[in-house]
């Protein structure tokens, strides 16, 4: 990998590991739907001129039904539900649980008949889900079942989104797909955000939303497209394994969240399971459905 590739890779690992801490700060004062609306609105506002300049939006709007399906799976549901979960759970815990996305993607593409569960995949799934069980069993109170349900839906949505891209939107300009999705998500959030608009605007929450919209969304996608162009889509998905480590580091060091036994045991198991379950699939063309499950997000 070139020096530029390494810089882009490290940048993406940090940029998409940061949102969990920012969301945790933002939802302390703002309703999760307000946070999600602010992030999508600002992201769309910055990317729209680029999409228009490159004429990437027209083809996407003509296939709006599939773009809407992708938006619901990858953005509208997950970004709201993550915020809801972080009203009760630590950001580092949420970031580590989201790392299970590749495991769910393996199950989905296997169910669709595009992959087979060989011994390596089965071992990876067992190890990965053992890590999830350790995180949930050791760190999360059973009273937080709502937050766990929200994260479960999020993980499934994050796994489905790239499959929709691969099967229905792969021939469209990526910048157009992202911009169109952010615009649709902002429109869907808008009436609910207006209803839940905060009566008191705090600096910490406001700057967190601005950071989510500008850095973790607009800048993130521009950098990610550059990374894909530099190293290819398959190698770029390795950032999936870096993001949770960044989320854990920021949660513990900046937000004072505890480093628990569940994290120490569960994190390496989830990452190891994801690597074993998704690397070097026997059918390369179809394996992209699984390996690209970490491309969009977060």
Image (tube, rainbow, N blue to C red):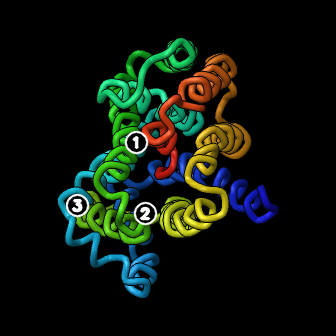
Q: Residue lying farthest right?
A: 3
Vertical placement of residue 69 versus 229, above or below: above
Q: Secondary structure at mark 1?
A: helix
Depth-wise, is mark 1 or mark 3 nearer the camera? 1
Q: Earlier in the sequence, mark 1 or mark 3?
A: 1
Q: CA distance from mark 1 to mark 3?
A: 18 Å
Label ID, residue 15: none
Rendered location of residue 116, percent (x, y): 42, 21
Q: Secondary structure at mark 3?
A: helix
Vertical placement of residue 226 versus 32, above or below: below
Q: Residue at x 22, y 60 (%)?
A: 188
Q: Residue at x 50, y 59 (%)?
A: 205
Residues 254 and 211: in front is 211
Q: Secondary structure at mark 2?
A: helix
Residues 246 and 63: in front is 63
Image quadrant occupied by the N terminus: bottom right
Residue hosting label 3: 188
Q: Earlier in the sequence, mark 2 or mark 3?
A: 2
Q: Earlier in the sequence, mark 1 or mark 2?
A: 2
Rate crowding at label 1 as few (under 14), some (14 to 19) or many (20 or more) other CA atoms within 10 Å.
many
Task: Using the rendered view, name the quadrant where residue 193 is placed.
Answer: bottom left
Residue hosting label 2: 39
Rate crowding at label 3 as few (under 14), some (14 to 19) or many (20 or more) other CA atoms within 10 Å.
some
Residue hosting label 1: 158
Rendered location of residue 32, percent (x, y): 37, 50
Report how many numbered discs are placed on residues in the image.
3
In-image side of 173 versus 247 (left or right) = left
């Amino acid at each position: 990998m070139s020096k530029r590739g390494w810089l882009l890779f490290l940048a993406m690992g940090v940029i998409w590991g940061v949102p969990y801490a920012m969301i945790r700060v933002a939802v302390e004062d703002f309703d999760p739907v307000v946070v999600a609306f602010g992030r999508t609105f600002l992201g769309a506002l910055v990317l729209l001129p680029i999409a228009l300049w490159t004429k990437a939006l027209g083809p996407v709007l003509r296939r709006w039904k599939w773009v809407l399906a992708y938006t619901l799976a990858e953005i509208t549901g997950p970004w709201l539900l993550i915020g809801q979960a972080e009203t009760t759970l630590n950001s580092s815990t949420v970031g580590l649980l989201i790392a299970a996305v590749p495991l769910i993607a393996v199950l989905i593409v296997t169910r669709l008949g595009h992959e087979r569960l060989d011994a390596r995949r089965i071992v990876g799934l067992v190890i990965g889900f053992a890590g999830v069980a350790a995180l949930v069993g050791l760190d999360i109170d059973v009273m937080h079942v709502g937050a766990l349900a929200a994260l479960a839906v999020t993980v499934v949505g994050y796994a489905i989104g790239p499959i929709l891209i691969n099967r229905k939107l792969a021939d469209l300009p990526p910048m157009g797909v992202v911009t169109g999705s952010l615009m649709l998500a902002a429109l869907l959030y808008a009436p609910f955000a207006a209803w839940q608009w905060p009566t008191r605007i705090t600096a910490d929450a406001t700057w967190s939303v601005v950071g989510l919209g500008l850095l973790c969304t607009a800048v993130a996608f521009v950098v990610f497209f550059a990374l894909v162009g530099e190293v290819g889509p398959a190698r770029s998905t390795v950032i999936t394994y870096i993001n949770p480590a960044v989320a854990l580091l920021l949660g513990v060091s900046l937000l004072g969240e505890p480093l628990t036994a569940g994290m120490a045991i569960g994190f390496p198991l989830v990452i190891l399971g994801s690597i074993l379950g998704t690397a070097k699939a026997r059918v390369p063309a179809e394996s992209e459905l699984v390996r690209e499950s970490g491309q969009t997000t977060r």
